[in-house]
Amino acid sequence: MKQNSRFISRSLLSATMLFIFATAALAANTRPRPSVQQGIGYGGAATEVVLSDLPDVTAADLAATKPEASPRNPHFTDAQYGAAKLAALHHGISSRPQDAARQLIPRNPAIKAASTDTPGAFVDFFGASQGCNGLGWTPSDMGLAVSSLYVVQVVNECVTVWSKAGALLSGPKDLCGIFGLPANAGSHGCFDPRALYDAQANKFVISASYQDGTGTAYILIAAAGKPSGAWHSHKIVRGAGLADYPTLGQTAYINNPNNSLITVCDNFFGITFYAECLLMPKAGVYGKLGGFPVFFGFSLGGLPLDTLQPANVYELSDNPRAQFAVDSVNYNGGDGFCDANHTFDQGLVVWAFSGATAGQARAAGWYTGCNTSAYSFPGSADNAGFCSACIETLDNRISGMVYYSQGELFPTIDTNNGAASAVLGWKVHPYLDDNGFGCTGGVNCPLITAVTIEQEYCYDCGGGNSFEAYFGDVAPNPENDWVMFATFSGTGVSPGQFYTSNRVSWATPFHDGGIYSCVNDAAYTQGRWGDYGAAAPDDPGTNLKNAAAVWGSGMYVQPSGAWGTCVAGVRPQDGP
């Protein structure tokens, strides 16, 4: 998201919500219960735009850059949020304090390590940078998707197409253009982009948020087979307000393509706040999008939840029978669910949506309870000797795309490391019954009946100001080896992207600190960083070796002080 004062809007609930009913999840009686409401959304007329036909960004476009609304935590006023972040710098309470004895530092790829388990990237190149559509867009945000031929990167407010060797094929073009909108349109332009690749349909999908000049919010969604060619897009009205921090996922059913979904969730700020998820059939996204289920008002123990990440079921052999989504408890302990002193939170909430394309949409959630390590707001990070506590690390939301592979979900959050930020992550296994909702006509609507935390890990918990990690993104390969891309900084180094890998047969991550993809010591004075990075599994195409590759994209500081990005591909199985 781009830098601006936090957005507050007053509006009526979206007119697209035509009916409401509550659905409560099964949960142990001692745990707060998840609940959600249901409505209907509508697509509308589609737009076709050819990316290569869009004009290059002009000097006027660069000068007309508009400020973007910052990500808001709906549970705090601006003053409360600022006080919580300031307190996080000083309270000295770290998640997983047992990790403090083993701190991790990425190494420069030019320095050969005597022993390392993370293999070097097979490709690493500079991506889009600040200035691709005006220097005012801060920070980058990030979407990345990879097919057998192309790499598509989206940032605020540009879209760029690369070959898998890092050759520029198209762009950067103004992001609003692929949605049929003028450059820097509306109140904030087209912001908070995400991207994925649908191997089932051989299509790239990009989502973004948009607010027109009247204050009406939209979710934007566009798809293309050849990314330099025609993009087919929809502008989905959400009502008066702001659809903030949209997230993106999909289900991919090789044996039932008509039951496949593109799912976008967002934090909607209107007269009231609620998180919502739009479950759109792929056939509609790629063609004519009519009505589709919308779930909103996600809550836990009566308190509203925010920032759901719908799972990206990228592997065609996976058929989880539901669209999963996962979120953290982003109250900094204010909810009191796990800590009577209101200093930390624990646990995750996993949701399962089913029956969405058969007119029998259902949703259920499961709260894991207080069975993860404690987490609390991270302190702001440092930028070497240039400034202290000057890099925004946000809160405890799950910022990166969450992948589903072989029954497992891979979420991460930023958490306090004793002074600044560490990346806390999990491997999560949800369980479904057969047809607990009792859908009819051969439609399977399973209930989520349990969630287990299979593995927990942290990169630089206990690291304080010397070892800081934030905005972690994890993507698996088909074997469930995985690579995490994240930002590292501290009092001695400026923020830059690194990656570290984990084999599925390893009991405990991490075996080493990983390797930098891009880093440069320079003053970054813009505060906002992230607000999320990106990781993406490779698509094998005809080269079977590609099947085990994972790609990632993140930020670093350019010598000018502006942000830049880099894109890297890593094969985790190339390690020991």
Image: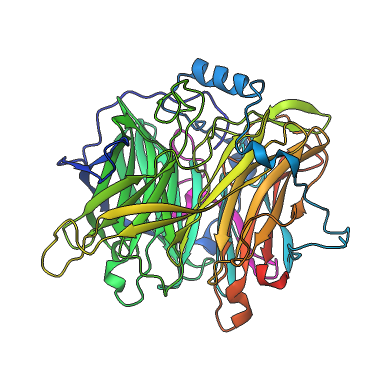
Q: Residue at x 61, y 76 (%)?
A: 546
Q: Which residue is drawn at 47% across and 29% down?
A: 72
Q: Is residue 159 visible?
A: no
Please check the rendered image and state whether residue 167 is part of the magenta-colored stretch, yes or no.
yes
Q: Which residue is drawn at 53% across and 51% down?
A: 426
Quarter holding residue 62:
top right
Q: Where is residue 386 in the image (x, y as percent from the top left)?
A: 81, 29
- Residue 127 located left or right of residue 439: right
Q: Which of 96 and 403 is in front in this view?
A: 96
Q: Position of residue 245 (x, y in %)?
A: 46, 40
Q: Where is residue 517 in the image (x, y as percent from the top left)?
A: 74, 55
Q: Position of residue 516 (x, y in %)?
A: 76, 53
The magenta stretch is 161-189
Q: Nearer the viewer, residue 207 or 188?
A: 207
Quarter holding residue 317:
bottom left
Q: Residue at x 73, y 70 (%)?
A: 576
- Residue 333 located left or right of residue 558: left
Residue 264 position (above or below residue 245) = below
- Residue 492 located left or right of residue 405: right
Quarter of the figure with the N terminus: top right
Quick one: which residue is furthest to the bottom in this view?
542
